[in-house]
Amino acid sequence: MSETTVDLLIVGQGVAGSALAWQALRRHLKIHVISSPTEWPPSASQVGAGLITPITGSRLALAWRFAEFRSSALDLYRFVAHETKRDCWRNRPALRWLTIADEELWLSRCQKFPASANYLQPVEPDLVTSREHGIHGPAGSKPYVMPEAARVLMPVFLEATKRWLTETSCLSRAEFKPLDLIWDDVARHWKWRSMTARHIVFCTGYTPQLIRLPFLAAKGELMEIDLPGARQDYSWHGGIWMTPQEQDRWLVGATYDPLHLDQEITSEARLELSLGLAQWGIRNPKICSQHAAIRPALPGQMPAIGWSLPESILGRISEVTWPREKNCGVINGLGSRGALWAPLLADWLLDAMAGQPLPPEINLTRFLRS
Ligand SMILES: Cc1cc2nc3c(=O)[nH]c(=O)nc-3n(C[C@H](O)[C@H](O)[C@H](O)COP(=O)(O)OP(=O)(O)OC[C@H]3O[C@@H](n4cnc5c(N)ncnc54)[C@H](O)[C@@H]3O)c2cc1C
């Protein structure tokens, strides 16, 4: 087999690896992606809903550098739509129902950080409820809307990326094994099978056997339900969330289980999501499908990217001879925000490869002992 030389070898084609591949293309780098040959277990990206929301959780805090991440995400997904004619971005405002206590908390946040007020605004209940279907907010709460919320249709993005990589012969469907990777100290490049690469980046999600990170991963389950005729202009958030799909279908999620790190669907999750739906007046919906995957999360719920990593980060690669300049990187810890974070993180990693410093909050070196 003839040898192929690339600038960048990417391991993993979830949202992180896919975003990195596209950002590298925009910088005219020659890339190759190694992606698992099997559909099972499903990756977080295959299962995740791709929701982008500025305000989440009971603290009603604005997500870190939200505007910057959103703008970079929109820019990349639009670029991909232009290149592939498959548009995965949907502007999809999200509803959040606030109790009186929540409203007080929100008002005090807006007094402290006035710009926050743009991200969560009161809206008239009649404009958002689906009375004819009995869908309404929880008793004693008022609707607020996040106009900046959006949704990335992950299956569309992943499939369009896979097709592009396949058509340009930039994809190997193979299980990456550390022993297949060799550093050539004279030529100063990596060798993987018949490929040579100046740089390699691991975007492998929750893979404790490969990457030594202090994962705080959590299994998540979601389900698809039928809700014929319900108005589909908003996602709903509050404990659980539901977001419209095509043709009367809604996606409902997601559970958070840090104890059972597998991809099996459970009746417990179905019950938890069904109880969550009942708060909005939706009872006994027809459940069409259910899925589970593992979110790759890290302490502090912040992602981690790193470049020129020390050997200690990469598990079980001790057989590999490491160069002093380790042309090796990682994007991981995307937690529940992969759709929002992946495009800008990928850009930052490429900047780091070009010698730029990384923001300390997401620099993987925060996990290294000095
Ligand atoms: C139920 C659920 C709901 C979610 N909802 C949302 C949401 O609404 N919004 C949002 O932004 N995020 C959401 N997420 C989180 C989001 O899915 C993740 O943040 C994101 O998908 C992580 O992407 P990743 O590319 O880092 O990892 P992954 O998606 O896990 O991708 C890693 C890839 O690497 C491959 N790989 C691993 N090891 C190897 C190897 N040795 N050789 C070859 N290939 C390998 C895997 O097969 C996989 O394709 C949700 C997650 C779950 C589980």
Image (cartoon, grey):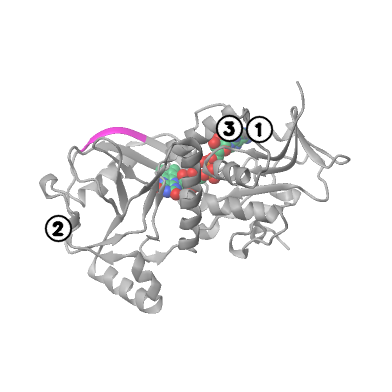
Q: Residue under circle 2?
A: 126
Residue 286 among magenta residues: yes
* Cα separation between marks 1 and 3: 17 Å
Q: Position of residue 300 (x, y in %)?
A: 52, 60
Q: Residue at x 17, y 60 (%)?
A: 125
Q: Earlier in the sequence, mark 2 or mark 3?
A: 2
Q: Nearer the viewer, mark 2 or mark 3?
A: 3
Helix, strand or loop at mark 3: helix
Q: Is mark 1 within 8 Å of ligand 1?
A: yes
The residue positioned farthest toward the bottom in the image shown: 111
| Residue 283 badge | none
Which quadrant of the figure contains the N terminus?
top right
Please indicate, yes or no, whether residue 291 appears anywhere in the rendered image.
Answer: yes
Q: Nearer the viewer, residue 267 or 352?
A: 352
Q: Is residue 70 above or below residue 218?
A: below
Q: Residue under circle 1?
A: 176
Q: Position of residue 102 (x, y in %)?
A: 29, 68
* Cα separation between marks 2 and 3: 46 Å
Question: Given the image, on which type of amino acid does mark 3 rest?
Answer: Leu
| Residue 165 badge | 3
Helix, strand or loop at mark 2: helix
The answer to whether 181 appears left or right of 248 in the picture is right
Helix, strand or loop at mark 1: loop
Q: How many residues crowd around disc 2 within 10 Å: few (fewer than 14), some, or many (20 or more)? A: few
Q: Position of residue 4 (x, y in %)?
A: 74, 30
Q: Nearer the viewer, mark 2 or mark 1?
A: 2
Q: Nearer the viewer, mark 1 or mark 3?
A: 3
Which quadrant of the figure contains the C terminus?
bottom right
Q: Which residues are magenta?
A: 285-290
Question: Given the image, on which type of amino acid does mark 2 rest?
Answer: Asp
The residue positioned farthest toward the left in the image shown: 132
